[in-house]
Image (spheres, grey):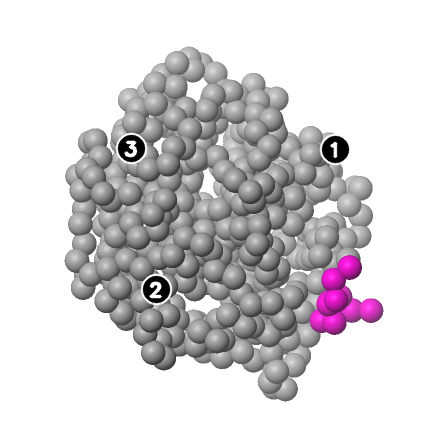
Amino acid sequence: MKLTRREFIAAAAAAAGAALPAWQAATAASAPLASAAAHAPRRNVLLIVADDHGYDMSGTGGTVRTPVLDRLAREGTLFTDAYAAVSSCSSSRAVLYTGLYSHTNGMYGLAHDVHNFSLLDDVKTLPWMLKQAGYATALVGKLHVKPLPLLAYDDWLLPERAGNRDVAAMAHAAGRWMHERGKQPFFLTVGYSDPHRAGDPSHFGNTRDWPEVTRQRYRPDQVQLPAHLPDLPGVREDLAQYYEAVSRMDSGVGLLLDELAAAGHADDTLVIYLSDNGRPFPGAKDNLYSDGIRLPLIVRAPGQHKRGLRCRAMVSWIDIAPTILDWAGVAPPADYRLLPLPGRSLLPVLDTPDPAGWDEVFATHSFHEINQYYPTRALRTRRYSYFRNLEPGLPVPIASDVALSPSWQAIVAAPGAKLGQRSLAAFQHRPAEELYDLAADPDEVLNLAGDPAHAATLAAVRQQLADWRTATHDPWMQGVLDPFGPAH
């Protein structure tokens, strides 16, 4: 049977060595859409990864213009409760590639420059696993995960370059590569740099026109202010720049999908669109609060019975690798680091608006940059969000691109400014435990962890999080002063 997250935790904690049959049984039990995978003549995969794109689309009521993503959602399934497993670029991408949480796969923080975090040596990745099954593999654009030999793509087209936001060149490079594959199935990853801030955090690569893209400009009074940001002129101007980068990326996705169709593979390719973490603004990116991890996820699969469906399943980026492997009919190797994989294939729920058993997700954060250590583990259910801040004596660090942004500069310069309803002091100094009632407090401001009326709920989520940490081999379970940890 298909394992729920709770069943995975119980199985992994009880008998990790017997996990492979559980994975095989779970894969075999997929719905008809998934079970047909092994019999299809070709099962291509196009994974599209945006950089710092929050839950901002015109199709979900936003004022940013994203006609291509809206169309893709009409052609597939939009997951309205989809969450990254960590809100940091390299760590989040490593989850996508490995099917393991960042505290399990070793990608604790950023890969580039002096940060130099890396996957553990015994971790396998999607491109490696799919290559063993005969897939051609290629990456266009941003990788941001180390070490390169473990990623094992056949081709790396147009590697990320500072200042480059040429989404048309990316699309055409992908198109040429797809045309050249012949009958070989492929796994193609397209990693955009948009809408990440540019090297100068005051803009988003909007300093010039880009080929084949109609530039979309926004007035500051046009932007929709997220709940975690104050209404200040500098914030609005910054958001307008971010919106332009989102629209440019949307145009790039359109060019990419045109290339997919021109290559003759629109009808035999699983298309997944998502972002690595929340928008690059204070209170979102680099935080496990909702705006840091609730992100767009669109899946379009050949053979879907329903199109334009909005699925309320609480899904996680930990589910992406199992989905792709399920589609390809490929299982992880028997000696993989953690089996069964903690995620589940999304294919069986693509046609279901409100599937049962998808009511919780977990998240983890350890580092962003090398000097930005703030380990947190989190559980999110339909009703509550719970956070264990493992080093509450430390101040909460702010990603350098966010700290240098016009938004942050405007916030710290404004007397009494808040991040939404949260004071700057509360944002930067957090207690060991946080518990929020999402029905009454969706912005996660009123901490109920010390409220006797919620003691039973606190004990339950505390134990649930501890069980998950044990099942996923969280190394912070050892040698860390954790008085709220697993029951003794």
Name the disc covering residue 335, or none: 1
Q: In the rendered structure, does residue 487 fall within the stretch colored magenta?
A: yes
The single residue placed furthest to the right in the displayed view is 488
* x, y percent for residue 246: 29, 47
Residue at 57% across, 22% down: 131
Name the disc covering residue 409, or none: 2
Q: CA distance from mark 1 to mark 2?
A: 49 Å
* x, y percent for residue 9: 70, 54
Q: CA distance from mark 2 to mark 3?
A: 29 Å
- The relative height of residue 180 versus residue 427 in the rendered view (above or below) is above
Q: Are marks 3 and 1 in contact (CB under 8 Å)?
A: no
Q: Kindly report which numbered mark, 3 or 1, lies closer to the viewer in this rendering.
A: 3
Quadrant housing residue 224: bottom left
Residue at 74% across, 62% down: 480
Q: Tell me which amino acid carries mark 2.
A: Gln
SS of the residue at dot 1? loop
Q: Are marks 1 and 2 in contact (CB under 8 Å)?
A: no
Mark 2 or mark 3: name the one nearer the start of the chain: 3
Residue at 56% across, 56% down: 372
Q: Which residues lie in the magenta part? A: 479-488
Q: Is residue 477 left or right of residue 176?
A: right
* x, y percent for residue 422: 43, 75
- The relative height of residue 363 versus residue 232 in the rendered view (above or below) is above
- Circle 3 sits on which residue? 166
* Label 2 packing within 10 angstroms: few (<14), some (14-19), many (20+): some
Q: Is residue 351 visible?
A: no
